[in-house]
Amino acid sequence: MLGLRQKLSLGFGGLLLIMLIGGVQSLIQFRHLGQSIDVILKENYRSVLACQDMKEALERMDSGLLFTFLGYPRLGNEQIKKNEAAFEKALHIELHNITVPGEGEKSAALQELFNSYKVKIHNLQKQSPSGSARRVYLDQILPLFQQVKNTADDIL
């Protein structure tokens, strides 16, 4: 027969063992959950950086086009070419890093808008900086620029 002291020790010892097992399982689950959250945050952060890079490259391309209007076509063309590559690199990252529902469709729409923007810019670069070229810029390219930028903001 067990005495009162032994029975109490066994009872509290059992409770202590149950609490230790529960605590260890909780720590394991929290660690696993923390790693999963880190992966999600990293993936989303990549999309955020890609969208910011796209917006900056787009702004620089627009500035390059304005340089050509101001009579500095070589500087403008260099800036457009450099930032077109930067935009496409960031877009590639975004297209291969879809983490949120609906992000894929927006990214595809962004790609289509940017392709249209590129075509219009390259066509405008071939024209001399005349009044009609400025009108094309204001009527066609600037609104398309805003659409590309707004779509990148939506993804962001």
Image (spheres, rainbow, N blue to C red):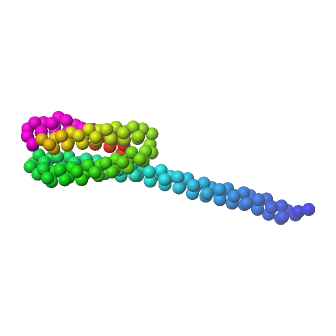
Question: Quadrant of the image for the N terminus?
Answer: bottom right
Which residue reaches farthest top?
A: 139
Q: Is residue 134 magenta?
A: yes
Of 136 and 20, the residue lying toward us: 136
How many numbered circles does the render carry? 0
Question: Quadrant of the image for the C terminus?
Answer: top left
- Residue 140: x and y, percent? 19, 35
Of 105 and 4, the residue lying toward us: 105
Q: Is residue 113 above or below residue 51?
A: above
Q: Is residue 140 magenta?
A: yes
- Residue 82: x and y, percent? 24, 53
Q: Which residues are magenta?
A: 128-148
Q: Magenta part mainly helix, strand or loop? A: helix
Of 78 and 36, the residue lying toward us: 78
Q: Report whether 57 appears left or right of 5.
A: left
* Residue 154: quadrant of the picture: top left
User: Is residue 105 at least partly visible in the picture?
Assistant: yes
Seen at 84% across and 64% down, the residue is 6
Seen at 79% across and 63% down, the residue is 9
Seen at 60% across and 54% down, the residue is 29
User: Is residue 51 at least partly visible in the picture?
Assistant: no
Q: Is residue 46 above or below residue 10?
A: above
Which residue reaches farthest right?
A: 1
Seen at 18% across and 40% down, the residue is 123
- Residue 118: x and y, percent? 24, 42
- Residue 24: x and y, percent? 65, 59
